[in-house]
Image: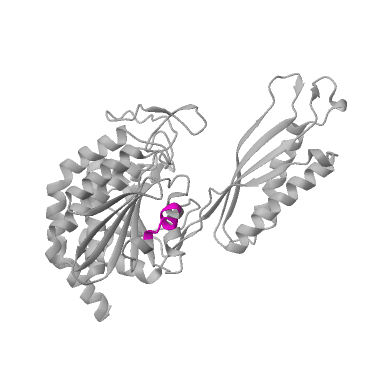
Amino acid sequence: MVMKPLCLSLLLTSSLFAADVASVTKQELPSLVSLYQDLHGNPELSLHEVETAARIAKELREAGFEVTEKVGGNGLVGVLKNGEGPVIMVRTDLDGLPVKEQTGAPYASTKIVKDDLGREVNVMHACGHDVHMASFIGTARALSQLRDQWKGTVVMIGQHAEERVLGARLMLRAGLFSKFPKPDKAIALHCASDLEHGKVGIVEGYALANVDSVEVVVKGVGGHGSMPHLAKDPIVLASQIVLALQTIVSREVKPGDPAVVTVGSIHGGTKSNIISDEVRLQLTVRSYKTETRRHLIESIKRIVMAQAESAGMPKEKMPEVIVSDDQAPALYNQPALCAEVRGIIGAAIGADNVLTREPVMGAEDFAEYGLTKEKVPLCMFWLGTQPPEVVAEAKTKGTTLPSLHSPFFKPIPEPSIETGVKAMTSAVIGLMK
């Protein structure tokens, strides 16, 4: 194979600083693992990341960044200028999840807090945001120490409320691209629960899905369980709605067009012999295409109302369909930028360790940064977190490993963070060249 001049130049340039990046990473690794364990044991829920944001801001300042806190809420921005050159943005997320950790790790979270509704809930970094933050700070330290290797401006943002897919919008509305240097390119990483540590995965084009949260309030006429003819049972109606919703993807969406409609929560009734007067359904809706997203929402509304009408619900008892503001657009990884990042990271950790991954139906509001009028190119890559032998065994047996958001998801900190820092730092420096 004849290598194109641009690719060859990129590979040679990347190789020149790979050894320096690896050296700095190795030096910083013990303190980064300690930082990870501290963050892991002290997670905070979305929109409550006060201590987490303060810790990340402190670490960035100590690395030489000019830091602004409280950007759009608990978001923060660190800027490091190093002469004339491109502006590259690196993003990490800060928030944890209302999950009770069951990994058995000695640094496991035992934290219990009150959520937005005042309920006591356990909190865990079940999506790997603690690995993201440790890698982020390692990258900041490495870039500061290797300023002789690059020219330009690095903008590092700690984004809150990613799990609510709100933080990116809030930071953009607060002037992220007007009050701070506007990025020419933006990159991020995300833990993968089924990929070996030491490897990264890249998806070119659409990588993560649109997500919408929908609540359906099914109303009824309450009564005695022994006299259903005198009532209008919302539990029966809700059950019919759940089944009917399954036909949207199977019969209304073109085969091959990714779409998901999942009813994740159903609540109604108080006692076996009482017909309730209300049932609430909570749905997550996933897609890639804008027109598919619109069709899914409209179909949900149509089916819900039609089922209620067929059950003879009076006008004043028709259901409500509420589409939440907690929504995110599909993440589009710009192919040209991904190809560039792939080459740079491959030179740093080995080309065989940079894999091509398939798109998934998860969601990420990192997508928001590429949808403003500036049209900033984005690339988010997956970071391996699991022992190679564990991944191999799961493939051999046909079993699945604990997924992201699982109480059993347990990244292996040291090699995962080491690869995260080497990959991200190399990517930033390479994009500056």
Residue located at (79% from left, 47% from top) = 306
Q: Position of residue 34 (x, y in %)?
A: 20, 37
State whether residue 60 is above or below residue 295: above
Q: Quadrant of residue 54?
A: top left
Instruction: Write down the region rendered in magenta.
Output: 170-176
Q: Position of residue 4 (x, y in %)?
A: 27, 80
Question: 278 left or right of 415?
Answer: right
State whether residue 226 is above or below residue 427: above
Residue 383 seen from this side? yes
Residue 3 seen from this side? no
- Camera-nearest residue between 108 and 42: 42
Quarter of the image that includes the C terminus: bottom left
Residue most toward the right? 229
Asked if residue 172 lies in the magenta stretch, the reply is yes
Asked if residue 427 lies in the magenta stretch, the reply is no
Residue located at (74% from left, 45% from top) = 304
Judged by its main secondary structure, the magenta piece is: helix
